[in-house]
Image (cartoon, rainbow, N blue to C red):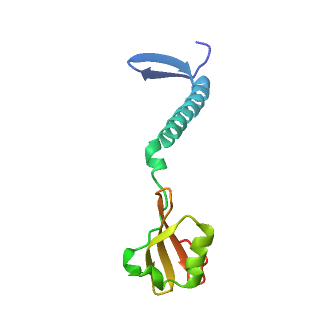
């Protein structure tokens, strides 16, 4: 052989005779190829998420029903009733609730049959809870 230092490698039952100088170069290349393969596989599995699971994760802000106590719609402050009639002229307040901070939860029904829940403070300003 042309090189005095020869290494015999057994791979899958086959004996390979490779000069040591070329062996170190091939080992470095194999290490890089192995690293690239592992990195590629890891990145593919990182993005293989179920689309429904991701879309289903939404932040919801809930209001406990226990915080509000029902009141008569005639007992609403004038500012709250005016705000509803101004911003929702076709709407009627079907139910009203109040909490300790004098915030009002209003169930409003529009002429077209749709219903919604609105929140207002005692001054008639719309708030989000």
11 w.r.t. 57: above or below? above
Residue 32 in sight: yes
Q: Residue at x 60, y 83 (%)?
A: 123
Task: Please identify the residue farthest to the top as the structure is shown.
Answer: 1
Residue 126 in sight: no
Q: Position of residue 122 (x, y in %)?
A: 56, 84
Q: Residue at x 53, y 32 (%)?
A: 37
| Front-most of residues 57 and 44 | 57
Q: Residue at x 43, y 47 (%)?
A: 53
Q: Quadrant of residue 14?
A: top left
Q: Quadrant of residue 84?
A: bottom right
Q: Residue at x 43, y 17 (%)?
A: 15
Q: Quadrant of residue 120?
A: bottom right
113 w.r.t. 122: above or below? above
Q: Position of residue 8 (x, y in %)?
A: 47, 21
Instruction: Tell me if 2 is positioned left or right of 47 in this view.
Output: right
Instruction: Tell me if 66 is positioned left or right of 46 in this view.
Output: left
111 w.r.t. 2: above or below? below
| Front-most of residues 55 and 7 | 55
Q: Position of residue 45 (x, y in %)?
A: 47, 39
Q: Position of residue 82 (x, y in %)?
A: 60, 77
């Amino acid at each position: 052989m042309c090189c005095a230092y020869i290494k015999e490698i057994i791979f899958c039952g086959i004996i390979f005779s490779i000069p040591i100088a070329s062996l170190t170069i091939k080992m470095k290349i194999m290490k890089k190829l192995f690293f690239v393969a592992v990195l590629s596989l890891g990145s593919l599995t990182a993005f293989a998420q179920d689309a429904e699971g991701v879309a289903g994760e939404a932040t919801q802000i809930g209001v406990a029903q226990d915080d509000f106590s029902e009141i008569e719609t005639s007992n609403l402050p004038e500012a709250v009733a005016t705000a509803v009639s101004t911003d929702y002229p076709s709407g009627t307040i079907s139910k009203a609730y109040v909490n300790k901070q004098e915030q009002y939860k209003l169930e409003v029904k529009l002429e077209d049959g749709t219903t919604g829940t609105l929140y207002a403070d005692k001054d008639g300003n719309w708030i989000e809870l």
